[in-house]
Image (cartoon, rainbow, N blue to C red):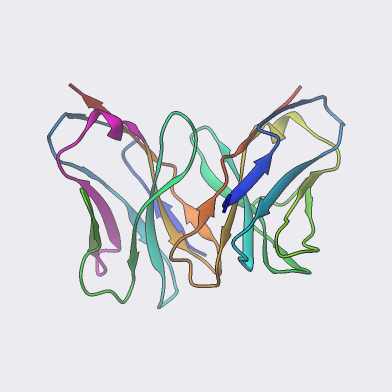
Amino acid sequence: NAGVTQTPKFQVLKTGQSMTLQCAQDMNHEYMSWYRQDPGMGLRLIHYSVGAGITDQGEVPNGYNVSRSTTEDFPLRLLSAAPSQTSVYFCASQRDRVVETQYFGPGTRLLVL
Amino acid sequence: AQKITQTQPGMFVQEKEAVTLDCTYDTSDQSYGLFWYKQPSSGEMIFLIYQGSYDEQNATEGRYSLNFQKARKSANLVISASQLGDSAMYFCAITGYSTLTFGKGTMLLVSP
């Protein structure tokens, strides 16, 4: 049982490049979320999903796309990276709507030059 | 919309002393949950403690306790007998619909 895994751990992009941050969980959780963490800002919700095929926007969705084709995977896509997207990205999952415990992945550090 | 306010950017405590990290919240939901997470310098988010809005007793987990005062909308974290390994960022969070809203965090430094 690996929990929530994220790849890559580190990534450097040039402005305008695209990339996908991968997130997978093996706990059969229905709910998955993406957060970004910036200095002094805490974690802010980008997108979330309440099940395969269902996604919705969070607080800061602009510049990011998501899809949920399987229960296990919830990739985050940056279509045209900008320096403002330099951040640490966390993926999280939970069993159901009752958020008693949300499991976080180890994070992906992204630098956009 | 939910909101979490953590007014202490940094806190200092000596080893073996108790420390209280403040958290106030705002929500229009009748049912909600409050969380505290620890983030050490290595970066991972570590779940510490959870309090449901209908729980009558304050939550405790080992050296961590949550001082829940519903009328004041506060959910302070109390760490008893601080240890050097407690030095980290601490985040308070509140449930939304299946997601969490976080505060900006408090940096705790424990000195020998």
Per the image, is A92 magenta? no
Q: Quadrant of residue A85?
A: top right
Q: Residue furthest front?
A: A1
In screen coordinates, is B112 left or right of B46?
Answer: left
Q: Is residue A66 above or below residue A87?
A: below
Taking the image as shown, residue B93 lies to the left or right of residue B11, namely right
Label count reads 0
Image quadrant holding the N terminus of chain A, namely bottom right
**Residue B76 part of the magenta segment:** yes
Taking depth in this image into account, of A88 and A57 the one nearest to the observer is A88
Q: x, y percentage for residue B69?
A: 23, 64
Q: Is residue A59 visible?
A: no
Q: Where does residue B95 sit, x and y in percent of width and height? A: 47, 64
Tell me if residue A52 can be seen: yes
**Magenta stretch, residue numbers:** B69-88
Q: Residue lying farthest left?
A: B17
Q: Position of residue A99 (x, y in %)?
A: 48, 66
Picture residue at 78% right of the left edge, 32% below the top: A82
Q: Nearer the viewer, residue B90 or A93?
A: A93
Q: Is A60 in front, or is A78? A: A78
Asked whether, in this view, residue A38 is left or right of residue B23, the answer is right
Q: Position of residue B93 (x, y in %)?
A: 43, 55
Res. B84 image quadrant: top left
Residue at 81% x, 63% y is A69
Quarter that holds the C terminus of chain A: top right
In percent of the image, x 49 and y 39: which residue is there? B44
